[in-house]
Image (cartoon, rainbow, N blue to C red):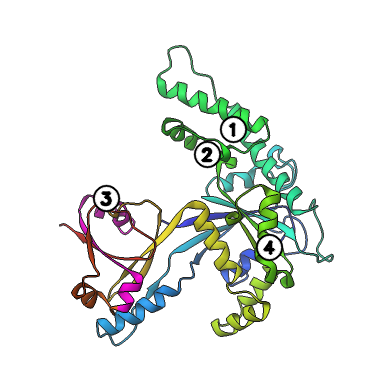
Amino acid sequence: MSLSIGIVGLPNVGKSTLFNALLKKQAAYAANFPFATIEPNIGIVPVPDARLATLAQVTKESEKLSELPPEVSATVQFTDIAGLIAGAHKGEGLGNKFLSHIRETDAICHVVRAFTDTDIIKEGSVDPVSDLAIIETELMMADLETLSKQREPKGNANREEKVRWDVVLKCKASIEQGKATRFLSFTDEEEKQVKQLSLLSMKPIIIALNCDEDSLKDAATLESKYATDFNINVDQVVAISARTEEQLSGFDAVDAENYLKDLGVERSGLERLIRKGFATLGLITFLTAGEKEVRAWTIHTETTAQNAAGSIHNDFIKKFIKADVVSFDDFVACVGWKNAREKGKVRSEGRDYLVQDGDVVEFKIGA
């Protein structure tokens, strides 16, 4: 599976600049006027994972290869969605056309303006908290329209229809109270029905504080402060400088690392944003290593070995026999599969084993 994140926000808060930086090319048209982005731009970005390079080196040595095996990263799909304004749900600005693009994403990244450049026109932007409230309100109002189109079941309706209607009323009540539906709790039956509604305010959110470069050294403090202001978990807030990311995209790995050190920052905004996305959606990666490739695979936490095998190929689910599992650290310390098995570090796990982040796995699949 691939994580899909929609980048949204008011016009001129830095969405397209951030998107360009994420893709390491000018894939979106960033300009200093509202609605520079007309169609949603979509890009696939590899997830930074230093473990892959180590796995490749270990595999080359253990398998006596002449070259390093290819590295295949997990990926994140970013969708750059045009700037929304107050009234978007009624068609103001570019309106509902762009709200529909958000429905197709797993999570929403709200970019809010926390930088001080007065040369960049403010188009409805006031402050991060107010800006977020405007966009969240638009998403909830769009949901209210969706819910209003639902019809009350007739007297002879089955249980499923009655549960669906209860969910509709529950969500409407929440939005009318100004509360996003993602804060509601649902039973398993209700969960099935609410998913079919594709509500925008149900999607998990990450807040990207687009701040000045010299503020990055205080990122942790900023994230903690605004998490309180936004009334969300600090894992859902990331301080990032879109301009800095744009500069970093033109550097090689060494220069980028040195530049970040000069700024007093350990990781790029891209890496921190992706980490927050994984944490928000409860995602982890497991690893595979062999002569053909070393690869990271994205799965949800609490995924069984049998279902994890299905992320490689659907047929592997029904043909699953077992999974050989070793921790990344043990795999590296033993220099590959052979020594790890000889030293008893490889475990044979059944279909119900819950795969852990960083597990190196070799699935045994039947014919």
Residue drawn 55% across and 51% down? Answer: 107
Mark 4 residue crowding within 10 angstroms, few (<14) / some (14–19) / many (20+): few
Q: Give the mark nearest the N terminus, 2 or 3.
A: 2
Tell whether position 139 is magenta.
Answer: no
Residue 221's tag is: 4
Does the image show residue 40?
Answer: no
Residue 266's tag is: none
Q: Which residues are magenta?
A: 307-333
Q: Are marks 2 and 1 in contact (CB under 8 Å)?
A: yes
Residue drawn 68% across and 41% down? Answer: 138
Asked which secondary structure carries label 3, the reply is loop
> Mark 3 — residue?
352
Residue occupying the far bottom of the picture? 66
Q: Give the mark nearest the N terminus, 4 or 1.
A: 1
Q: CA distance from mark 3 to mark 4?
A: 41 Å
Residue 198's tag is: 2
| Viewer-nearest of discs 2 and 3 | 3
The amino acid type, in three-letter code, at marker 3 is Asp
Mark 1 residue crowding within 10 angstroms, few (<14) / some (14–19) / many (20+): some
Q: Give the mark nearest the N terminus, 3 or 4.
A: 4
Instruction: Work out whether 243 lies above or below 69.
Output: above
The amino acid type, in three-letter code, at marker 1 is Thr
Q: Is residue 124 left or right of residue 259?
A: right
Q: Give the mark nearest the N terminus, 1 or 3.
A: 1
